[in-house]
Amino acid sequence: MKFLIFALIILCSCSLSKSRTPTQTISAFELYKVYKIDSIHNFYLIYAKKRDSIYKIVSQKYMDESCNRIRVNNEYQFNLHSSLTNRRIGSDVILPQNSLLVNCFYYDDSTTICIERDSINDLHYATNVRGLCIEK
C-alpha cells in the first residue's frame, strides 16, 4: 500500500514538472508595451502599459543615433523605479509624508512634470534607459 501511494506521488510530481512551458519561465521578465512618446523641454515622457497598469516614464533627453531606440508599439523590459518612493538628497532617500498629495515633480528650473490622477498615479524612471535608448 505504501508503495502504491509513493508511486502516485512520483507520477503526479513528474507530470507537474513536465507541464511547464518555456513561456512560463520567461514570464518573470515582463514586458511593457510603449503606446506613446512625448517630450517636454529636456525630458522625454514614455507612456507604457503592462497588464492593466499604465506607466509614465521620465527620461532626460540624450542623443545617440547608434543606440537601441525605443519606439511606439514595441515592447521592452524596463527596470522601473517609482519617483514617489525613490526621491534622494545625496545618499538619503526622502519619502513624502503624504505621497497622495504629490501631483507634480520639478526636474529642473523650467520643467515640471505632473502625474495624471485618472490613470497614472506615479512618475517612474528606468535605470536601463538613457534618452530614448534602452540598454540591451
Image (cartoon, helix red, strand yellow):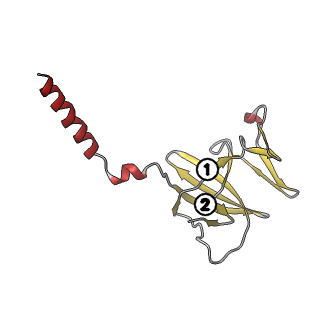
Q: Amino acid at mark 1?
A: Tyr
View extreme (top): residue: 1
Where in the figure is residue 99, as x and y percent of width and height? 74, 35
Q: Which mark is residue 104?
A: none
Read off the residue under disc 1.
Answer: 55
Read off the residue under disc 2.
Answer: 36
Where in the figure is residue 87, as x and y percent of width and height? 76, 44
Kindly identify the residue that appears in the image at 39 percent across and 50 percent down.
25
Q: Amino acid at mark 2?
A: Lys
Give the left or right position of residue 61, taking residue 29 as reference: right
Q: Quadrant of the C terminus?
A: bottom right
Kindly identify the residue that appears in the image at 64 percent across and 62 percent down.
37
Kindly identify the residue that appears in the image at 65 percent across and 77 percent down.
65
View extreme (bottom): residue: 65
Quarter assignment of residue 35: bottom right
Give the left or right position of residue 26, taking residue 108 as reference: left
Where in the figure is residue 31, as x and y percent of width and height? 50, 55
On screen, residue 25 above or below 42: above
Density class for disc 2 (Cα within 10 Å; few <14, some 14-19, many ≥20) is some
| Mark 1 touches mark 2? (CB < 8 Å) | no
Q: Quadrant of the N terminus?
A: top left
On screen, residue 47 above or below 65: above
Quarter assignment of residue 11: top left
